[in-house]
Image (spheres, rainbow, N blue to C red):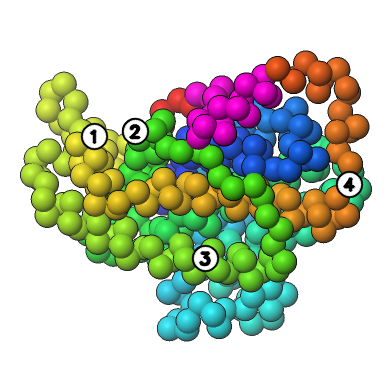
């Protein structure tokens, strides 16, 4: 990935990341859920912190944590990638991994930290690292974060990244079904992480070909948003697609964005739950003042009930 692009490609925009983290709380078991609900706004808002670190704070070490360019490892099948962080750093040096990205290994590192935080029952670490895990597990479900053709730039499909991750969820997200299964225990985090990456990467081709189909069907003139004087609207110096084109592309993908968002929610809940179980399932609710839990009871019930019907309440995200 080239440096100038890193700042504007976020995997899920703020809409996606915030919805993923917030919804995952409702898939947790009872022993975790009320505690997480007490801090649901923190978990929601902090979902975008990793992107702020690399965007606004320009933290140079941050970018490579958000993606893995599978093709840059040569022509090897994903099953032969080093599974653990230790294996990765034995095989490759950090300069190489900073270019290719190391998202799957970063997730594993964070999971160790989250498990430790649960063992120590350190409330602020639990919440902070949970939000981080939610971010990167979400990123692992974005097909363009697993390929060197991350913005369609190698195939004349530039701008596709922001269209997929921000514009489409913002346009259609309110009709998505947010109800998932209850969190389940993952017996091997590195195996699970790699199977997510493998599945996500397998979608990159269909994503790109859906865009090609939609482009072939679209009038070049109507592909991009126009301002009052008829000029193409730019965002981060790239043309913004028209809503009509976003609709065509979304139709051609046959629900892929919603499916990946739902898988993200499910996996974030699974990962949080797994770290908690691995830490010995510590009791959490007494980390909070019981008045806080009491105050939140009513809203919690309302939000939980809505989630059971597939709806997410109390979250509005500004458009990017
Ligand atoms: Zn990211």
Residue appearing at x 43%, y 74% in the figure: 71
Query: Which of the two discs, 1 and 2, labels the residue nearer the N terminus?
Result: 2
Q: At which x and y percent is residue 255?
A: 35, 49
Residue appearing at x 69%, y 62% in the figure: 186
Distance Cα–Cα, label 2 vs label 3? 26 Å
Could you classify mark 4 by the number of other residues whose Cα lies within 10 Å: few (under 14), some (14-19), or many (20 or more)?
Answer: some
Q: Answer yes or no: disc 1 within 8 Å of ligand 1.
A: no
* 4 vs 2, front mark: 4
Residue 282 is labelled as 4
Query: Which of the two discs, 4 and 1, labels the residue nearer the N terminus?
Result: 1
Q: At which x and y percent is residue 237?
A: 31, 41
Secondary element at tag 1 = helix
**Residue 236 is at least partly visible in this image:** no
Query: Which of the two discs, 4 and 3, labels the residue nearer the N terminus?
Result: 3
Disc 2: which residue: 171
Residue 243 is labelled as 1
User: What residue span does the magenta drawing correspond to?
Assistant: 299-316
Distance Cα–Cα, label 1 vs label 2? 8 Å
Secondary element at tag 2 = helix
Quarter-wise, where is residue 319 in the image? Answer: top left
* Residue 130 horizontal side relative to residue 149, left or right: right
Mark 1–mark 2 contact, CB under 8 Å?
yes
Residue 197 is labelled as 3
Distance Cα–Cα, label 4 vs label 2? 40 Å
| 121 inside magenta stretch | no
Closest to the observer: 71 or 181? 181
């Amino acid at each position: 990935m080239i440096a100038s692009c890193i700042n504007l490609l976020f995997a899920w925009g703020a809409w996606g990341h915030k919805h993923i983290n917030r919804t995952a709380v409702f898939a947790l078991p009872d022993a975790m859920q009320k505690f997480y609900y007490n801090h649901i706004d923190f978990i929601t808002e902090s979902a975008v912190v990793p992107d702020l670190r690399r965007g606004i704070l320009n933290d140079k070490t941050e970018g490579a944590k958000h993606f893995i360019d599978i093709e840059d490892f040569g022509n090897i099948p994903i099953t032969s990638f080093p599974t653990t962080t230790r294996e990765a750093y034995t095989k490759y040096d950090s300069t190489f991994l900073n270019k290719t990205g190391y998202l799957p290994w970063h997730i594993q590192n964070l999971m160790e930290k989250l498990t430790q935080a649960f063992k120590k029952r350190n409330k602020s670490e639990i919440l902070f690292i949970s939000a981080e895990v939610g971010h990167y597990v979400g990123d692992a479900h974005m097909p363009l974060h697993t390929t060197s053709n991350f913005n369609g730039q190698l195939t004349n499909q530039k701008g596709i990244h922001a269209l997929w991750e921000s514009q489409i969820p913002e346009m259609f997200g309110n009709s998505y079904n947010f109800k998932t299964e209850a969190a389940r225990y993952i017996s091997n985090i590195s195996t699970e992480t790699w199977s997510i990456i493998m599945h996500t990467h397998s979608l990159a081709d269909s994503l790109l070909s859906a865009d090609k189909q939609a482009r072939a069907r679209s009038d070049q003139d109507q592909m991009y948003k126009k301002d009052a004087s008829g000029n193409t609207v730019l965002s981060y110096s790239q043309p913004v697609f028209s809503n009509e084109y976003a609709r065509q592309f979304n139709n051609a993908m046959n629900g892929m964005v919603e499916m990946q968002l739902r898988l993200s929610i499910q996996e974030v809940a699974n990962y949080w739950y797994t770290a908690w179980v691995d830490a010995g399932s510590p009791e959490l609710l007494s980390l909070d003042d019981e008045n806080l839990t009491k105050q939140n009871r009513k809203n919690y019930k309302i939000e939980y009930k809505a989630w059971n019907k597939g709806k997410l309440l109390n979250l509005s995200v500004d458009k990017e």
